[in-house]
Amino acid sequence: MRAFQLRIDEINAAGGLLGRPVELVFEDSGGAPEKGTAAMEKLVNKDKVVAVAGEGHSSALLAEMEVAKRNHIVLIDCEAWSDQIRLRGYQEVFAIPAGNTMFNKKIAEFVKGVGFQRPFVIGEDTDFGIESIGLLEKAFQEMGLTYKSLVVDRTTKDFVPFLLQAKEFKPDILVCNVTGVGSYLLIKQAKETGLAPTAECAFFSGVADMGYPELWDTAAASAQYVVWETAIHPKAEFTDLTKPFVDKFTKTYNRPPTYSGLQAYDCILVLEEAIKMAGSTDTDKLIAALEKMKIKGTRGEISFPTEKGVYYHQAYVPLLFLQYTAVGQTPDKCEIVFPPELKTAPLAKPK
Amino acid sequence: MSSKAVKRAAGIVLLVALLTLPFWAGVYWTHVSILSLYYVIVVSSWNLLVGYTGQMSFAQVSFSSLGGYASTIMATRLGVHPVLGMVVGVAAGAIAGYLLGVLCLRMRGVYHSLATLAFAEAFRTVLNLEYKVTRGSLGLLSVPLFPGTSKVPYYFTVLGLAACTLFILDRIIRSPVGFTLQAIREDQTAASVAGVPLARFKLFAFSLTAGMAGLGGAFLSHYIGVVTPDWATQNAMAFILAMAIMGGLGTFVGPIVGAVTVQFLAEYLRVLGRYYMSFFGLTVLLMLRFAPGGLLAVFQNLRASWARRRQPARE
Amino acid sequence: MSEGLKLFLSYVVSGLVIGNVYGLMALGLTIILGVMKIVNFAHGEFYMLGGYAAYLFSIKLGVSPLLSIVAAMVIVFLIGAFVERALLTPFYGGKLDRPSDYALLMTFALSVFLMNVMIPIFGPYQKSAAPLAQGSVNLGVVQVGATRLLASLVAILLMALLVVVLKRTSLGVALRAIAQDRDAAAVCGIDVNRMNPVAFGIGTAMAAAAGALLAPTFLVYPACGTLAASKANAILVLGGMGSVKGAIIGALLLGVLEALGVLFLTPGYRDVYGFIVIVLVLLIKPTGLFGGQEI
């Protein structure tokens, strides 16, 4: 939301869009589908917004996109990864973040690329987590690796029974697709039960929460050696829009943005460009504009393919795998351990 | 104008307003009214079990969500028409209510309440865990009851359902059955000694209440388009409780007044943002503490003191 | 030792470590039930308040973790006593139609209020508290976090302390007398009405202690009391509504039952077993395994 506001302030400072000021109306879906639909109803029918952007939870977005379709209003997915969103092929919906297929493909490549043989996957009971497990298992099977997985309730706080089960499998890498505070607790408890990160078993977490400083508040020393993925790193600047945005965000809010901040900024850039190209806020014209555009965002060039399938209306997203090599480290000091062409250091292991 | 004529005129105005609501209230407030009517169904039926029969239950939300899930699963997995799904929702609710009733038959007071709470929480957990059937905390997308985007048919449907529910409840309460239920509330042991087959009446109350909740939930799932485990939480139960208490537990009109008041209040309170639920909770607390009879009792007290003031004291 | 047995024991031990802390909470619930004959439906929220207090003291004010726990207990004791005076007195007034329903609904409404009022005050995001220890300890069959283990030991200490207070001090004797027979206690000269807020305060202080102890492990957020409360309820029912000995044994039993469930069924259902236990016990022996009216 902060990134949204940042861009909107910039637009308004430069005179607005089509000569008119832009206003951000905010509703909280709490990641819950019926709250999300209620919020959408309010935004679309009561506040009469011109377009909607946001949402980090796939399940909520899946419900919200129905409202978008019924009311024929543009909805830009800001941080929801489910393939289902793309597969439905609604013309009103455009996706900025990576879809699960895109994302998990990279994880599988990472696992194989660094040489792990026995992955254990823990996923949360949401579209994101469950789809990930399915996609990863398929990939691992094709690679001929021995693997196992477990689904956990995303609100769990005590992961020890699951971790003990994982320990029994004797994996060499623990892949965790659990969002929110659970992601931190998993690290802490995995370390406490002696599972990972250890010399025998690495820890990978594929969620945005890994980039926040709260990681160190909660998981503390256990998070050293955790590998995670993101779309930004100072040593891998993507476009000339990246650094100005990062600097401005950091200055305004006293903390650097994570990749979801960049994604959010890109959401507004995309909408802004569409309105300019269309010369109006009419939904059909916006959709036509969005499908035609090729603009520069903060993470690379953005365009939305129209071929139906998992990449429908899906912007391409670059992905990096970073590792925390010291306690309290900030994301920009991390080492890049994958992909090989951008690597800055080999994978580090604790003693 | 005599007060009876005033009352009748007011009643007619209200009726006309209700019947034409979608045409003058706008899309958003029609939506709020539909939600209120849903709560009228769920809270009024809960009132039968708790207010009239005296059996405390924290599981009402389990039955409404069960109705929602049953109907949705029928409609999406088995391709059944939502109306038939709703029938299944009612049946599912009624059966589950019956089972809970059986479980709680021999329990009294605090144990009874604890058991219903345990049931409600276990049910919610199962909804979350059995994600292969329910899609867990993601929620299950449902099939709309009517094609198109208009809320009008939904409004009249739920209005009709609420009217039927209230009619049935009214008939029961005024009948000997209702009298017996209240006797059970007042003193179970005495009623039993007087020859009342407690089990039969309690189970009747349990399953009817749960079935009606299932009806409401099934309808709601096809209106909102999605059903989630959040429906079955105790936070949701708190709404029902608040509505019943605010209106007046154990009265017929109480739940109706409570449901509408609280739902509309909730919409206005949204502006409070983060303070919304706590303000709400505080209101319920204060209401319980200082006016346990609910708004209805407050209103009646006001009327009584007003009447006393109009009549001069007798010498 | 066979792998299966080792796994089972690892579940049992890790379950018991945490279970003790819930046992402490259940003990508080037992005292409230025994003395006041009320089931405190807001008990989980006092656990949550204890957690927030621990956060405030240990993180915001930099007080030592152990002292923070004590501070949490004191503060919540006072809050509990206040709540009792403000909200629960009608229960004894004799003017209510259905006093037990009143207490139920009131504590339920209180729980909703407390849970939601934390959101604007502290924000919906989870907070932590300073841990009692770092690292992990190897217990043979399983490795557990040192924080948890220490929390467990402190809980055992507090439970023992409470038992001593109940058996040896005049306060404790008064409480037990009221639990046994309120009117007789009044006749004996005990000021029953003044004991109510004390009993409620002690009970909630125990919940707060549990919350403060587990704050570093499971974090603190507005809804964190719900799960804890359900475990405490399960222990209460298992061990006997209103029996101190029962609460302690109930905690151990719950730990073992959950471990068995996890081993033979799935780990995901672990928290449901508590509910199943409640329902089964209530069906078979509604007053719990050691049930009775004394504490």
Image (tube, coloured by chain):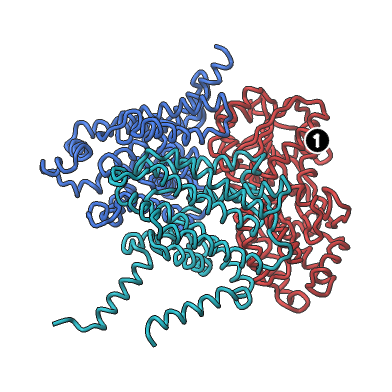
Chain colours: A red, B cyan, C blue
Instruction: Give the image location of residue A275, x and y in percent.
Output: 80, 70
Q: Nearer the viewer, residue B133 or C67?
A: B133
Q: Residue at x 83, y 57 (%)?
A: A302
Q: Is residue B162 above or below residue A225?
A: below
Q: Quadrant of the N terminus of chain B?
A: bottom left
Q: Residue furthest top?
A: C1
Amino acid type at circle 1 is Glu
Q: Secondary structure at mark 1?
A: helix
Q: Nearer the viewer, residue A323 or B257?
A: B257
Q: Residue at x 47, y 30 (%)?
A: C146
Q: Quadrant of residue A37?
A: bottom right
Q: Residue at x 26, y 54 (%)?
A: C89
Left or right for A21, reference C246: right
Q: Is residue B34 above or below residue C190?
A: below
State which chain disc 1 sits on: A
Q: Is residue A130 above or below residue B20?
A: above
Q: Residue furthest left?
A: C188
Q: Nearer the viewer, residue B312 or C83?
A: B312
Left or right for B213, reference C39: right
Q: Residue at x 78, y 77 (%)?
A: A18
Left or right for C28, reference A112: left
Bin the neighbour count of mark 1 within 10 Å (Cα to Cα): few under 14, some 14-19, many 20 and up. Answer: some
Camera sees residue C26: yes
What residue would you read off at disc 1?
A109
